[in-house]
């Protein structure tokens, strides 16, 4: 137990520490996302969620005004399908390529995801635990206010014999502090 506590403290220390001379890069983003209906399964699905992104204290300057920034994303929302609704939440890392004076961002990531129910109408997702991978693009329309598009795929990575997966096209509005 003691060794686990020491490892946890070391990991937390790395996350909140900043290398000497590193510039301030940790910023927080809050936003809302909504999907358009997915028609590729037994039921039509929509997802609505709030999210928060925390930029981690590292970044890599790539030249030409582009940089690469690791983030941690937390989401919480509702998944609707088959006349039923369930809670959905995720927490995981992503990597953002940012350029054009920080006005354009391309983001990819993968997160463990928890569903409050496995079945929505006739569609079963097999397990409560899923994994969501995504790719997104967003653009700053006015200072700190961003609009974006995100394609995401959720599945249980075959930890269950039932693994239909779910692809969603999501639109987002966010504010970056």
Image (cartoon, rainbow, N blue to C red):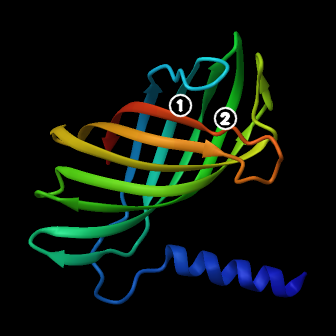
Circle number at residue 33: none
Secondary structure, mark 2, is strand
* Disc 2: which residue: 88
Residue 133 is left or right of residue 159, and the answer is left
Looking at the picture, tell me which residue is in the foreground, 130 or 38: 38
Residue 156 is left or right of residue 38, and the answer is right
Above-or-below relation of 170 to 121: below
Looking at the picture, tell me which residue is in the foreground, 134 or 138: 134
Residue at position x 49%, y 33% in the image = 168
- Image quadrant assignment for residue 20: bottom left
- Image quadrant assignment for residue 40: top right
Residue at position x 36%, y 57% in the image = 27
**Can you give x and y, in whole percent of width and height, for residue 154 in the image?**
60, 43
Circle number at residue 49: 1
Residue at position x 80%, y 54% in the image = 159
Above-or-below relation of 143 to 67: above
Quadrant of the rendering where the N terminus is positioned: bottom right
- Image quadrant assignment for residue 13: bottom right
**Can you give x and y, in whole percent of width and height, for residue 61 in the image?**
22, 77
Please report contact status of discs 2 and 1: CB closer than 8 Å, yes or no.
yes
Residue 48 is left or right of residue 170, and the answer is right
Residue at position x 76%, y 16% in the image = 121
Q: Reading the chain from its start, which is encountered first: label 2 or label 1?
A: 1
Above-or-below relation of 92 to 69: above
**Can you give x and y, in whole percent of width and height, for residue 66 in the image?**
17, 68
Q: Residues within 10 Å of mark 1 (few under 14, many from 20)?
A: some
**3D distance between C-alphas at marks 2 and 1:** 8 Å
């Amino acid at each position: 137990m003691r060794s686990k506590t020491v490892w946890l403290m070391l990991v937390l220390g790395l996350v909140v520490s900043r290398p000497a001379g590193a510039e301030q890069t940790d910023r927080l983003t809050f936003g809302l996302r909504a999907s358009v209906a997915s028609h590729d399964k037994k039921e039509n699905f929509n997802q609505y969620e709030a999210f928060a992104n925390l930029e981690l204290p590292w970044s890599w300057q790539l030249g030409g005004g582009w940089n690469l920034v690791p983030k941690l994303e937390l989401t919480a929302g509702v998944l609707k399908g088959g006349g039923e609704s369930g809670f959905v939440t995720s927490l995981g890392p992503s990597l953002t390529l940012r350029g054009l004076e920080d006005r354009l961002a391309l983001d990819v990531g993968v997160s463990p995801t928890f569903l409050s129910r496995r079945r929505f109408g006739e569609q079963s997702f097999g397990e409560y635990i899923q994994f969501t991978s995504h790719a997104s693009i967003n653009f700053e329309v006015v200072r700190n206010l961003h609009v974006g598009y995100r394609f995401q795929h959720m599945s249980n990575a075959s930890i269950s014999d039932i693994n239909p997966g779910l692809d969603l096209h999501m639109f987002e509005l966010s504010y970056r502090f």
